[in-house]
Image (tube, rainbow, N blue to C red):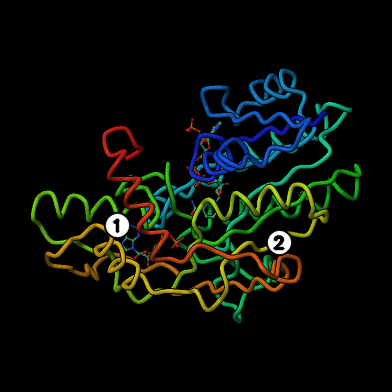
Amino acid sequence: MSVVLVTGGSGLVGSAIRAYVEGPGAACASGETWVFLSSKDGDLKVRADCEAIFARHRPTHCIHLAAKVGGLFANMREKVEFYRENIMMNDNVMECCRLHGRDGKVAKLVSYLSTCIFPDKTSYPIDETMLHAGPPHPSNEGYAYAKRMVDTMNRAYTEEYGCNFTSIIPTNIYGPSDNFSIENGHVIPGLIHKCYIAKRDNTPFVIWGSGTPLRQFMYSSDLAELTVWVMREYHSPDPIIVSVDESAEVSIKDVALSVAKAMKFEGEVVFDSSKADGQFKKTAGNKKLRGLRPDFEFIGIEEGIQKAVDWFNANYETCRK
Ligand code: NAP
Ligand code: GDP
């Protein structure tokens, strides 16, 4: 019997994995029990809480999503908290996976990194071998170094204790149950929320920065499916970039215009260039993923934004914002 413990199970990615394994055409294999945690089940920064969770569920597998997560502007403001909270959660979860699994230790741990933690000055496309080859962009140093240590420790746990720990490196993610906070969230949920208000109040829709930076965006249900596949089929401590193709990279301006279209907003669109652009681009190559999943079809950005906008409109009163 397998017990899959998903930390951060109430967030953007966690709720997509839950929908994938429990929803129509459920991908939950027979003999598999899935447990989706939120911070209400315990604070993973606290070792005793983490140990109690592992003692209660005795997982065979763990997908570790829980993190202090935020967009560019939150990362610039709270570098200390992004570093410390993520370091604490990651250290507790990894050590509990070593010590407290169903058969002595957890058979497989999949943690999440991010393409925004790669070196700022680099050649493109970025690949998995470049993770530590230079400092990250100064805007998210705290988050980046905390996440990079997961990769270092995956190799260390594998070498020293024979653990099967690995990590996924996703690009920007969006979808239902995202954090739609304008101040703290990522660009797509922030733009969706701002466009909603602009339409409602008949005010301009303001895009922060120049709109020229480039990003690769992945709809959360695609990532959910690929994460479950990594848990079952990908066995190496070396990370795997899970991303749409390089050709799917888009500018922030194009994303904003797609949000306006999906929201049926016809008012004025304004760029506030007094706000930071962050890293210009972080183009990730997905050669390793494509070598293993050549036919996987990602949801296109226009379709994904329409789904995310529809979800936000339908859940405006109760969603995280
Ligand atoms: P999210 O929506 O912000 O969800 C965060 C989850 O972590 C929530 O379930 C939250 O629980 C839980 N959590 C936070 N602090 C906790 C604590 N101290 N103890 C226990 N649980 C805690 O995040 P997400 O966007 O799904 O991100 C999932 C993973 O993907 C993260 O590791 C993130 O770094 C990575 N990632 C995200 C993006 C992106 O664009 N979103 C891009 C690249 C990588 P509550 O709901 O109870 O607060
Ligand atoms: P990043 O991809 O890690 O840099 O993080 P974000 O998801 O926060 O995207 C930041 C990019 O989107 C920067 O170029 C910002 O200038 C731009 N941007 C435009 N409007 C917004 C907004 O409302 N919120 C956020 N977070 N970024 C915005």
Query: Please, which residue is most extreme toward the left here?
Result: 202
Q: Percent x, y for residue 2?
A: 79, 31
Residue tagged 2: 240
Task: Specify the quadrant of the image occupied by residue 162.
Answer: top right
Query: Please, which residue is most extreme toward the bottom here?
Result: 123
Q: Which sits in the foreground, 101 or 277?
A: 101
Is residue 190 visible in the rendered image? The answer is yes
Q: Percent x, y for residue 74?
A: 39, 50
Mark 2 residue element? strand
**Quadrant in which the C terminus appears:** top left
Residue tagged 1: 191
Q: Which sits in the foreground, 231 or 128?
A: 231
Q: Is mark 1 within 8 Å of ligand 2?
A: yes
Q: Is residue 294 left or right of residue 275?
A: right
Q: Percent x, y for residue 221?
A: 53, 51
**Quadrant in which the N terminus appears:** top right
Identify the residue at image location x=84%, y=46%.
164
Q: Earlier in the sequence, mark 1 or mark 2?
A: 1
Residue type at tag 2: Ile
Q: Is residue 76 left or right of residue 130?
A: left
Residue 228, numbered label: none
Instruction: Say if mark 1 contacts mark 2, CB within 8 Å.
Output: no
